[in-house]
Image (tube, rainbow, N blue to C red):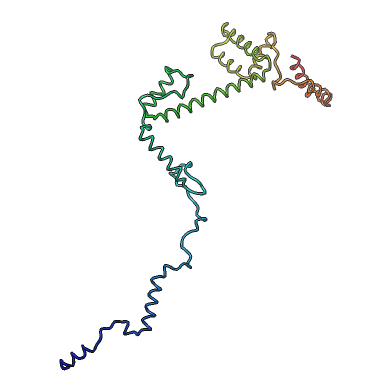
Amino acid sequence: MPEEATQEVEAVAPEIGMGALVGEEEKNESTEASANDENSHLETDAEPEGDDPDDVEFVQPEWLPDKFWDPENGVQTEKLAKSFAELEKKFSRGDHKAPKEYDTKFLGEDIPQDDEMLNNYMDMAKRYGFSQDDFQGLAQQFIDGANQKVMDQNEYVAEQKRLLGKNSDALVKSNITWAEGLINKGIITKGEFELLDKLGGSADGTRLMRKLRNLSGEQEIPIPSLTGERKTTQELQAYVQDPRWKTDPAWRAQKEKEFYDNIQ
């Protein structure tokens, strides 16, 4: 092609893009489709993915203490945060370490400072690095256990004395004097005395010892019935009115003994 013709074509040919080649209508359709694709994530009619919060079942982690867990709401974050803050305060004050001297004011005046068991306990606590809280917590457990043991023993003694009746003190003291006399005379050994002592630590054992002594001809001390309960006059009269009083010899013998015990 002649150079002049080439220059003429270049002068006439405009600069066009792809839109011009497909036509205006097709261009608009393509642009609309593209816009729809870009905004598809903004549609609100679609259901969000994931579980319904109301159907979520909480599972307690193995490392989480029960006091920080709520089966319905999961981890009690506020309570956990407060506990952590308190722990930080203890560490900052050095409360987690063994003090130079333990504070024993919580023991009151019942336990003197020179008590051997107390001092042994303090030595052990220092050796193992007990904090004041550890020292006091463990000591309180021992104290509570000892107090409960005393309470249980007092209740037991009161119940045994009730079963023995109004002569309980006389019965027990008499048995003690009798057993001590046997050991002083060389009739029984210290080991045998200890067995008698344990036997006499209950209402049943006290009655048995007294009955054995009665068999040897000693003067009797009134012993109440096995139940340890005194019958009222109305109860005793009811025995006589019971048909078994005339028809059941064994039953009548038992009730006659109760009459005797109450008269004694």
Q: Is residue 212 left or right of residue 135?
A: right
* Residue 9 screen position, x and y as percent: 21, 90
Q: Quadrant of residue 94?
A: top left
Q: Is residue 100 left or right of residue 67?
A: left
Residue under the image location 37 percent in, 75 percent down: 34
* Residue 89 screen position, x and y as percent: 38, 36
Which is more toward the observer, 113 or 185?
113
Q: Quadrant of residue 220?
A: top right
Q: Is residue 140 left or right of residue 98?
A: right
**Quadrant holding the N terminus:** bottom left
* Residue 198 screen position, x and y as percent: 58, 18
* Residue found at the very far left of the displayed protein: 3
Which is more toward the observer, 122 or 74?
74
**Quadrant holding the C terminus:** top right
Residue under the image location 45 percent in, 68 percent down: 43
Which is more toward the observer, 96 or 252?
96
- Asked if residue 40 is positioned above or below residue 201 in the image, the reply reads below
Q: What is the tally of numbered marks visible in this picture?
A: 0
Residue under the image location 70 percent in, 13 percent down: 222
* Residue 145 screen position, x and y as percent: 51, 26
Residue under the image location 40 percent in, 70 percent down: 39
